[in-house]
Image (cartoon, helix red, strand yellow):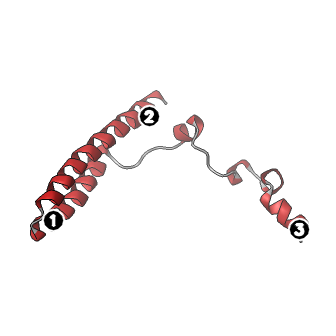
Amino acid sequence: MLERLTKFLDPTESVETDRDVPPRLTIQALEALRMSRSRERILNNLEEMYREAFERAKETGDPAQMASLDFAYRREQLYFEILLDVRDAMEKRA
């Protein structure tokens, strides 16, 4: 039983094909992936999520939470735009 377990846990013994290898975040893996979500869809989802949270904070009359959510939304939007720019550049490179 120990031999079977060792074989199961040893990646050189248990991998049958290249497709069985666990995914790794490498340039080759990124180049093989095509992103399906559009920039607009991602940013719209982000806006919708923050808008719902902002409305809840507004209903409770919590100005500190509203200000915090506003700042967080703008920060996350900037982060996503940067990541999307990197994604677009990598897709163009391929």
Q: Secondary structure at mark 2?
A: helix
Location of residue 85 by image quarter: top left
Q: Is residue 76 left or right of residue 11?
A: left
Q: Are marks 2 and 3 in contact (CB under 8 Å)?
A: no
Label 1 and label 3: CA atoms lie apart by 56 Å
Q: Which mark is residue 57?
A: 1
Identify which amino acid the numbered label 3 is placed on. Answer: Leu
Q: Is residue 55 above or below residue 80?
A: below
Q: Is residue 81 left or right of residue 25?
A: left
The residue that disc 2 covers is 91
Q: Position of residue 8 (x, y in %)?
A: 80, 62
Identify which amino acid the numbered label 1 is placed on. Answer: Ala
Identify which amino acid the numbered label 2 is placed on. Answer: Glu
Q: Nearer the viewer, residue 42 or 78?
A: 78
Q: Nearer the viewer, mark 1 or mark 3?
A: 1
Label 2 and label 3: CA atoms lie apart by 46 Å
Q: Nearer the viewer, mark 2 or mark 3?
A: 3
Q: Nearer the viewer, residue 4 or 17?
A: 4
Q: Is residue 83 left or right of residue 51?
A: right
Q: Residue, x 21% and y 63% (percent of image)? A: 53
Label 1 and label 2: CA atoms lie apart by 39 Å
The residue that disc 3 covers is 2
Q: Is residue 43 above or below residue 28?
A: below
